[in-house]
Image: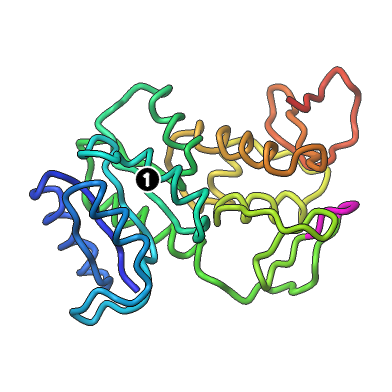
């Protein structure tokens, strides 16, 4: 397993690689989207002690094509849709960041950035994406929606629903706390494990989760407070949009 860094700036690649290697991670560097796509498709190892598949990809949004967003979309519709992805972007506008999140990114970091912050983001995403033994192994049900925490599997009426690691964690958390209202700050801390971060990250993941679950989601928007799964209340304080 290895961490892929895809950026056309060799200085960025070198700095990020050194920080990740300090954390004991094997790092593979590529300078363009074509090489990054090829690396993400490989399953037979990369040499130098790096075997198997890319465990997480750090992709520059503006590198020579395909760019990071195009690769992210391709991964999410490909054979390994749950591969964690962090986007590096020089675009500071919130709309541009939302585009990256809607493409399926688990996180993004805006340039210029602190290499240590990026290393912490990588560690956080890896913790959430790696299989774990939950305290409660029992399946969670809501009608025909089934969530199996041990297998990290979601099904609707027996058909599998592909979720990213963050989407899965968000769904499991909400299902384990039905009727409780959580602000975006609460969810960022509880699901992402962050004390900092752009709250639009939560908003976009809620939107994506609703879209993937379709009519079977019960994520309510509680105006002025946050989100809840199946909160009892009046129509005036609920939204299903």
| Quadrant showing the N terminus | bottom left
Q: Residue 132 placed where, x, y %?
A: 58, 73
Q: Nearer the viewer, residue 16 or 104?
A: 104
Q: Nearer the viewer, residue 99 or 229?
A: 99
Q: Is residue 168 magenta?
A: no
Magenta span of residues:
142-146
Q: Residue 9 placed where, x, y %?
A: 12, 44
| Residue reaching furthest to the bottom | 49
| Residue reaching furthest to the top | 236
> Residue 160 sits in which quadrant?
bottom right
The residue positioned 43% from the left and 63% from the top of the image is 126
Taking the image as shown, residue 225 lies to the left or right of residue 24, namely: right
The residue positioned 18% from the left and 79% from the top of the image is 48
Taking the image as shown, residue 15 lies to the left or right of residue 201, namely: left
Q: Is residue 145 magenta?
A: yes
> Residue 197 sits in which quadrant?
top left
Residue ID for mark 1: 71
């Amino acid at each position: 397993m290895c961490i892929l860094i895809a950026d056309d700036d060799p200085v960025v690649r070198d700095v990020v690689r050194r920080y990740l290697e300090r954390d004991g991670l094997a790092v593979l560097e590529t300078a363009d989207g074509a090489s990054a796509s090829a690396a993400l498709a490989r399953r037979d190892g990369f040499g130098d002690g790096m075997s198997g598949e890319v465990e997480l990809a750090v992709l520059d949004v503006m590198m020579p094509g395909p760019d990071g967003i195009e690769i992210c979309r391709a991964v999410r519709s490909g054979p390994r849709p749950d591969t964690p992805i962090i986007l590096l972007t020089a675009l500071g506008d919130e709309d541009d960041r939302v585009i990256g999140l809607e493409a399926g990114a688990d996180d993004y970091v805006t340039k210029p950035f602190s290499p240590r912050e990026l290393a912490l983001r990588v560690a956080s995403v890896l913790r959430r994406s790696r299989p774990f033994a939950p305290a409660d192994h029992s399946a969670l049900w809501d009608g025909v929606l089934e969530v199996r925490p041990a297998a990290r599997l979601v099904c609707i009426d027996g058909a599998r629903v592909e979720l990213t690691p963050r989407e899965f964690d968000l769904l499991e958390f909400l299902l384990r706390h039905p009727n409780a209202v959580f602000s975006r700050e609460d969810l960022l801390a509880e699901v992402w494990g962050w004390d900092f971060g752009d709250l639009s990250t939560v908003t976009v993941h809620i939107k994506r989760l609703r879209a993937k679950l379709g009519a079977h989601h019960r994520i309510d928007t509680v105006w002025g407070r946050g989100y809840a799964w199946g909160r009892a209340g009046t129509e005036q304080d609920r939204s299903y949009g």
